[in-house]
Every structure is written in structure tokens, then in C-alpha cells.
Amino acid sequence: MSPLATNTRTVALLLAGHKYFEVDKRKGNDVMWKFDERVYYKHFPMPRLRRLHPQVSSNCDRSVYSCIEFLAGIKQDIFNKTDLERFQMRTTATYYMCWYTMKGEEPLKNFMERRNCLEGINNVPDAAAVDYRITDYRADSSSDPLLCAAILFCPDPCYGRETSGSVQSSSALSNDPGNPCRHFKDRTCKWDFSDNDDFLDLQKNKFNITCKCDQTGFRFNSRFELCVDIDECEDIHTKCDKGKQCENTAGSYECLCPRGQRFDISKDKCIEHAPLPKHSFARTGKVRAHIQRSAFMRMVEYILGLRKDTGA
């Protein structure tokens, strides 16, 4: 391995220990931590850090190279820190390294050099706190240049409640009750790195994931975890000709003439409707008088017993 790849792998194992095995050290104690659920494989700590660790953020703000060099250099020293500070340092570091992964930074591509992404993960110091081993069927680093970085540095919102971070097969992931795409015909859950490169959104666990909706003309909404209609009329590529206007429909759109116009086939364009004849709907005095007389006569007939009701 090159020196840079070696340092990146060192950082990856340091942060993967946090992702798969650490718990929130901002609350509780040693006894409680043993029984806390490990959840950082599917989301960053909640609530997010109020303040990033100053040393880590100062170095990682500069560049991915500076970040890797600094984190690799404190590999041993970090375990001499208090539990709380170590938690803050590694959480801050995962924010940055996941962010650099989403941005597709060059040092994070193929840094495992065709080795298994999880090589050595079960031997990190943090693994001693649990009684299970981490595996992932996707960990073949030759399939995607950024795969190892995504697995080791980032939580995966596609993971469900039952995987515990280990994914034995594609069916295990797709059938997990926490997979947001499990209700669709295609249960594959994906997240596009280019849609997740906002640093603050990552800290807040606002991930943009993608499911393939069963109906055409619909798009998956990560926030509500359901398919919503695509407004084709908002798409600059949707154009209506012959004077027509775009009107969105469920799953599609229509091109219609503007209100007050109709499409003339012979002229092949929208034209004005023929104007309606002028008409007044106001009642004339003669009509009002007739109505009043009719009501009076009905009342007289009712009083004289010539009808059973007033007819009102």
C-alpha cells in the first residue's frame, strides 16, 4: 500500500470502530454503555454534536489530506482520552470523512487496493465490547472505487433494524423491516452521493435516499418515505406547443388551452371561445310584482280552506 492509502486505512478502522461498536458517551456510564444499542451504522449520533471537536475540525476543514494525516497521527493517543472526548473526536471525524466521501475525494477511492473493505474490523479495540462480528456481503472493494469509504466512514440509512450493521445477503437487507424500500416491487435502497454533500444536513441525518416507485411519474421522497407525484410542468424540458399550457396530473401531465379558449383543429391552435350573448339576470319590477301577487293569493286560499298549505 502507498503511505496515503495506509494512513487512510488506519483512519478507516479507527472510525469504523466508532460506527459499529460505540455508543453515546454524552450520557450514562460504564454499566449502561454495555447494554446500549449500537446504532451508528445506520445514522450519526442523535442529537448531533453541539460543537465539533476543535482540533479535529481545524485539521479536517483544510482538506481531506490534512484530515487523514491528522487522524492517522492520533490513532494511539485517542484511546488515552476520556470516553467523552474520544466520542466527540470520532464523531467529528466521521462527519468530515463521510462528507469527503460524498464529494468523491480522490484519496478515498480504492484505498483498500482490492482488499475486503472490512478487513481487520473485528479486531479493533472497540469490538471487545460486543459478542458479534461484522460482515457485509458488499465489502468487495473492486466493485466500486468509493464503496469502502462509504461502508467505513458513513452510516447507511438503508440498513434496517435487524441487520446490526452486518448484511449477510441482498435479501437480508431488502427484507429487513427497517428498509424504506421494502414495500415496493424493487426493494433496492440506494443513496446518490451527489445529493448528500451538504455538511450540515449530514450531521442532522438528513439523507437523500432513493427507492424505485412502482408507478411511473412518481418520485420517492426521503423525508416522508413515500412516493410523490412528479410535477412535470416544473421541468424545464416539458414544453407545450400551439399556445397550450402545461397542467400537471397524477403521474403525468396534459397540454391544454388556457382558460377561456378552445383548440380549433382546422386552425391547429387555441382560439377564443365565442362570446356569450349579453343577458341580465336581474328580476324586473313586473316579475317581482307577479311573484308577490302569487304569494298573496296562496295565503288567501289557505285561509279560506281552498288549499292545505301556503305553498311557500
Image: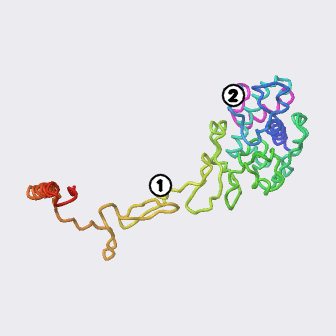
Q: What residue type is labelled 1?
A: Glu
Kindly identify the residue that appears in the image at 89 percent across and 42 percent down: 132
Residue, disc 1: 234
x and y, in percent, of residue 18 in the image: 80, 35
Q: Quadrant of the C terminus?
A: bottom left
Q: What residue type is labelled 2?
A: Leu
Depth check: give the residue in front, 225 or 44: 225
Q: In the figure, 120 relative to 269: above or below?
A: above
x and y, in percent, of residue 183 in the image: 68, 56
Q: Is the magenta stretch mostly helix, strand or loop?
A: helix
Depth check: give the residue in front, 173 or 277: 277
Q: In the figure, 213 relative to 70: above or below?
A: below
Residue, disc 2: 52
Residue stretch rendered in magenta on the structure: 54-77
Kindly identify the residue that appears in the image at 79 percent across and 57 percent down: 171
* Membership of 185 in magenta stretch: no
